[in-house]
Image (spheres, grey):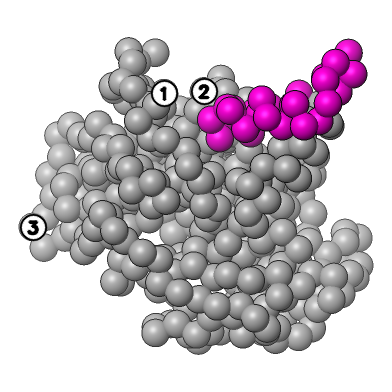
Amino acid sequence: MAAEKYFSTDVLLDILQRLPPSSRRRARLVCQHWRNVVDNRTTEMQSRAKPLFWDTCSAEAYLVSNLSEPWKATCKRMADPANYFRGGTQMVGTCNGLLCLCSNKEPGGTITVVNPATRQKLPVPPLRPKGLAVRRYVRPQWDKAYSFGYHPITGQYTVVHVPCSFDGVVYEFDRVHALTLGEAAWREVPVVIPGGAKCNLNAGIISVDGATHWFTEGGSPTIMSFDLLSERITSTRPLSAALPAGRDRYHLTEVHGRLGFAVLDGSVTTEVWILDKETWSRWYTFRRQDIPRPHFAYGEYVLTCESSSFYGHQRKATLELVSLGGTMGHVGRAKGTLVAKMKGECYRYRTFVYVKTTEPLNCFTQKPSR
């Protein structure tokens, strides 16, 4: 029987506010009433997700505020009180206000999870590759092989490292490695990929709704998916007609909680395909506009980029719903409203989702690995 028949909404709210943020998010899954109370009556959920721009050259983070009113949007450098951001560090991903960072100074990369709001940080046991031989003049971008995921049912955060190889490095990762925050050691998960293809690091890695996804490289690109709960690995073949030749012309993205990929057709169009109920559909086509990666969709707003500028678009106002070869999609017809003018070209920035949270990192006490 529904909880509201036993006690008032105010009592339920008082109980929910005593739970840690991660438990409140899981409580949303109980029923529609609980979802509404958490979404509408708790400060954390009322805080709209903000675009976070990460400067890959200077290791600086910038937050965009007021995206819901692009003409009022402001872009300010994110405070770094504990010196999290420093040379050689790159952003792997964000989950519920937690930032996953990777230092590329050590072989294999060194992962740290931080909460800027509480100034806490949690070092992750390093993943040390075996038999590594690195040419001295090369510093691999180890961060590109990692992803940071969250499972909405278990409330657990997991760092994932995918099978890959690096130019100039005499070593290949041939399996998935995963470490759930609080565990002491990485787990190895064998993966069988047709032809032994590794991850196409240029296409990015993204974690969506409790699973981590990456493109394989090679003749017929395939999307591999690693479920964070069952640790099963499955594969999905995108529409072959949607993917162009050339491993640098497409990348993974997330759109409204769904897995997607963007295709760059020279400088003319950018198409975005979404996996919805096991079917690929073309949702967006931006004419003569590029989109930031890996995230470009924020609620009812999307971002496009050109040169050193980022533009905000309200989907319903500036994107026209049209028929695209039997599927439904949106075609960009306006440049949008300038929301950020950065100090370098758009390609040097990666975009993430950030919501301020009080999620404590000290709750992830070290426990035995699975």
| Secondary structure under the numbered disc 3 in the rendered image | loop
The part of the image, by quadrant, that contains residue 59 is bottom left
Boundaries of the magenta span:
1-30
Callout 3 amino acid = Arg
Query: Which mark sits nearer the N-terminus, 1 or 3?
Result: 3
Depth check, front residue: 67 or 225:
67
* Membership of 115 in magenta stretch: no
Q: Residues within 10 Å of mark 1 (few under 14, many from 20)?
A: some
What residue is shown at x 81% (from left), y 78% (from top)?
A: 318
What residue is shown at x 34% (from left), y 68% (from top)?
A: 60
Work out which residue is located at the far left of the displayed protein and give it.
Answer: 136
Query: Which mark sits nearer the N-terminus, 1 or 2?
Result: 1
Q: Picture coordinates of residue 47 (x, y %)?
A: 63, 54
| Secondary structure under the numbered disc 1 in the rendered image | strand
Q: Is residue 318 visible?
A: yes
Q: Which residue is mark 1?
A: 189
Separation (CA) of disc 1 from disc 2: 8 Å
Instruction: Point out which mark residue 136 bears.
Output: 3
Q: Marks 1 and 2: which is nearer the front?
A: 2
Separation (CA) of disc 3 from disc 2: 36 Å
Instruction: Point out which mark residue 231 bears.
Output: 2
Tell whether 288 sits left or right of 178.
right
